[in-house]
Amino acid sequence: MASPKLEEFIKAEQELAQFAKALSHPARIAILKVLAQKNECVCGEIVDVLPLAQSTVSQHLKELKEAGLIKGTIEGPRSCYCINWKAFEKFNSSFNQLFNKLKVQQQSCC
């Protein structure tokens, strides 16, 4: 079996890929839109807005939190989440740097 080669990529590439992976599901995009509109949100409110089961929403919240795109606190039965804007700024900057670098290296193709 082949061993993973993730460690051969620089840290910035790994982080950018992790952010992109966290955004790779439409439900996560929808969750981020809800959080941006409300600025803070209780998990139950997210479940009320999306056509997904509570357990599914929780799994998507976990993925977003692990990627650092959201922050959350648990207070008894309530979980409160908000967008980590500092992480989004870093993500935006990293993507812009990547796109600018690729564009500079652009050549005619097909």
Image: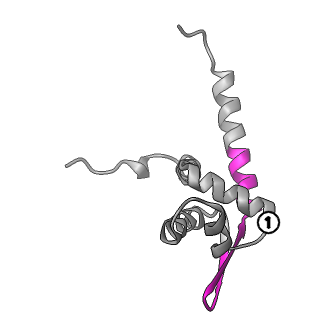
Is residue 47 rendered to the left or right of residue 59?
right
Is residue 2 rendered to the left or right of residue 67?
left
Q: Residue at x 72, y 53 (%)?
A: 90
Image-quadrant location for residue 28: bottom right
From what the image shows, is residue 92 above or below residue 43? Answer: above
From what the image shows, is residue 21 above or below residue 70? Answer: above
Count of numbered circles on the image? 1
Three-letter amino acid code at disc 1? Lys
Colour scheme in use:
one colour
Q: Position of residue 70 (x, y in %)?
A: 66, 66
Q: Is residue 88 magenta?
A: yes
Crowding around mark 1 (Cα neighbors within 10 Å: few <14, some 14 to 19, many 20+) is few
Provide the residue designation for mark 1: 38
Q: Secondary structure at mark 1?
A: helix
Q: Position of residue 59 (x, y in %)?
A: 50, 67
Q: Nearer the viewer, residue 81 or 109?
A: 81
Q: Position of residue 46 (x, y in %)?
A: 65, 67
Q: Position of residue 50 (x, y in %)?
A: 61, 60
Image-quadrant location for residue 107: top right
Is residue 59 rendered to the left or right of residue 29?
left
Q: Residue furthest left?
A: 1
Q: Residue at x 57, y 48 (%)?
A: 20
Q: Is residue 82 magenta?
A: yes
Q: Nearer the viewer, residue 39 or 107?
A: 39
From what the image shows, is residue 63 above or below residue 26? Answer: below
Q: Residue at x 61, y 68 (%)?
A: 47
What's the magenta region? 72-94
Q: Residue at x 72, y 69 (%)?
A: 82
